[in-house]
Image (cartoon, rainbow, N blue to C red):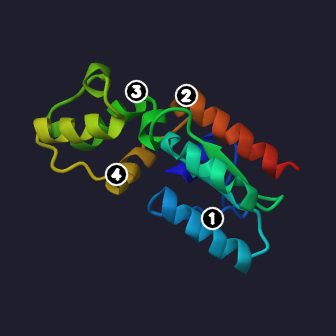
């Protein structure tokens, strides 16, 4: 999903030699970072959910000068996805089972929980983050599909590329 967002943000991951590696969680990300930082001489840019603030601060001193961290301001990655894009992706993929509106994907809990409940209630099956990411990636067409936080993330990443 990040490569699709990056293209509409004006950053082509392939052209810039950027590789997205899923780590499977904040603790695994640090272990992977320590391993990769010893094995490769390339910059590493890590993205963490907001609940990793303490972990980030206690490990920041391990960062090499070429590496950086972006912490999502609130929640998980799903929480920074635009509601309109989520609706577009679900309606395109599951439209025969019924359309959803923005009110269906907003609430007081995190977006992953909202989507888990929505999928169950609407009969879309089990919400699986990786599968949904693929569905969503196919619907990313323009800068209008970027939330403010995604715009900020790519602004930070772009500043690293232009150094």
Report if residue 143 is visible in the image.
no
In front of the other: 156 or 30: 30
Rounded to the nearest angstrom, the CA distance separating label 3 from label 4 is 18 Å
- Check disc 3 and report its element: helix, strand or loop: helix
Disc 2 + disc 3, Cβ < 8 Å: no
Give the mark nearest the N terminus, 4 or 1: 1
Residue at 58% across, 61% down: 20
Residue at 63% across, 64% down: 19
Give the mark nearest the N terminus, 2 or 3: 3
Give the mark nearest the N terminus, 2 or 1: 1
In front of the other: 10 or 115: 115
Q: Could you say where residue 73 lies in the image, as x and y percent from the top left?
A: 56, 33
Most extreme residue toward the top, as rendered?
Answer: 103
Instruction: Quickly name the residue at label 3.
Output: 84
Q: Could you say where residue 103 lies in the image, as x and y percent from the top left?
A: 28, 19
In front of the other: 20 or 142: 20
Above or below, comparing residue 40 to residue 97 in the picture: below
């Amino acid at each position: 999903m990040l490569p699709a967002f990056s293209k509409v943000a004006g950053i082509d991951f392939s052209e810039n030699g950027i590789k997205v590696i899923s780590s499977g969680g904040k603790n695994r990300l640090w272990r992977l970072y320590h391993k990769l930082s010893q094995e490769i001489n390339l910059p590493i840019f890590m993205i963490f959910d907001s609940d990793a603030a303490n972990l980030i601060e206690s490990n920041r001193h391990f960062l090499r000068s070429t590496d950086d961290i972006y912490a999502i301001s609130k929640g998980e990655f799903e929480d920074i996805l635009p509601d309109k894009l989520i609706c577009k992706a679900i309606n395109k993929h599951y439209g025969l089972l019924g359309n959803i509106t923005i009110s269906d994907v907003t609430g007081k809990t995190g977006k992953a929980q909202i989507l888990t409940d929505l999928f169950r209630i609407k009969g879309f099956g089990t919400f699986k983050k990786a599968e949904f990411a693929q569905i969503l990636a196919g619907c990313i067409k323009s800068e209008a599909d970027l939330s403010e936080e995604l715009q900020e993330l790519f602004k930070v990443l772009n500043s690293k590329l232009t150094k």
